[in-house]
Amino acid sequence: MGTFQAQKSKYYEGMVVDSVSGAHYDADTGQTTTAVGEPDLLADMRAVEQRETMQAVIRYAGMLAGIVVVAALLTWVAQPMHLLWLALANLGACMAMPVVGAVPFAEDDAEDLPWGVGILMVLGPAVGALAYAVLCVVRASFSPGLVGIFLTYLAIRIPLDGAAGNGFGHLFEAMMPFQQPPAGTSWATHLASLWVVFAGVVGWYFAAMFRQTDE
């Protein structure tokens, strides 16, 4: 089947679908399911899958917005617990991602996880997101789950830092892994605020508890 991001088809037993092109393949033989000269009977199904994924992403964006609002209010009320709210928000949001269908479950999308963990650990979520984007372009494949974790962290971190009273300059400095922590911030707090993105990775894996058993 070559190298592509395969996911289990929602509609056909024993088949996988390329998440990038939408093409369906037999899981055992790797052969495409559409014979030469036959009409592409799967085109409508691919369109349905793409539409469902887009609807799931929109639902997730709405849920994420709600989580951000609650976490920002908690941060504004109890600023010393900023890291806790940041971690809990990432955990809950990333747990919701595959449950609503915005990304695959971790067990179906874990090929890039070693790359993701290494990039997150060394470069942090902001610089790491740029590095992973370059890697995806070079490899011509990507993990929707990891992309979701990167974007979710940034969508939560930026407003929560604002609620904690940190300006844009402070946030920019805090996102740089090799730079001295912003004034008044210890190294421990600086690194913890970057590595709290791993709460999102944990949430993505914990989502398997809510997976439908008849999938």
Image: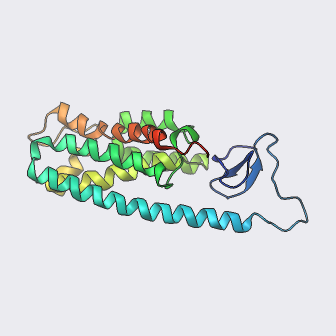
Say which residue appears at 39% left-offset and 61% top-offset.
61
Q: Is residue 195 above or below residue 162?
A: above
Coloration of the structure image = rainbow
Q: Residue 194's image quarter?
A: top left
The structure residue drawn at horizontal position 35% and vertical position 59%, both measured from the top left corner, is 63
Q: Residue furthest front?
A: 214
Q: How many marks?
A: 0
Identified at 49% across, 47% down, the residue is 145
Is residue 163 or residue 188 the one in the foreground? 163
Query: Quick check: can you spot residue 166?
Result: no
The answer, for residue 183, to whether it is visible in the render is: yes
Choose between 192 and 137: the one closer to the eye.
Answer: 192
* Image quadrant containing the N terminus: top right
User: What residue is rendered at 32% in x and 46% in y?
Assistant: 90
- Where in the figure is residue 148, as x and y percent of width and height? 44, 51
Give coordinates of residue 57: x percent, y percent.
46, 61
Could you tell me residue 79's position as x and y percent? 10, 47
> Residue 144 appears at what percent x and percent y?
51, 50
Q: Specify whether 9 is left or right of 95.
A: right
State left or right for residue 69 relative to residue 145. left
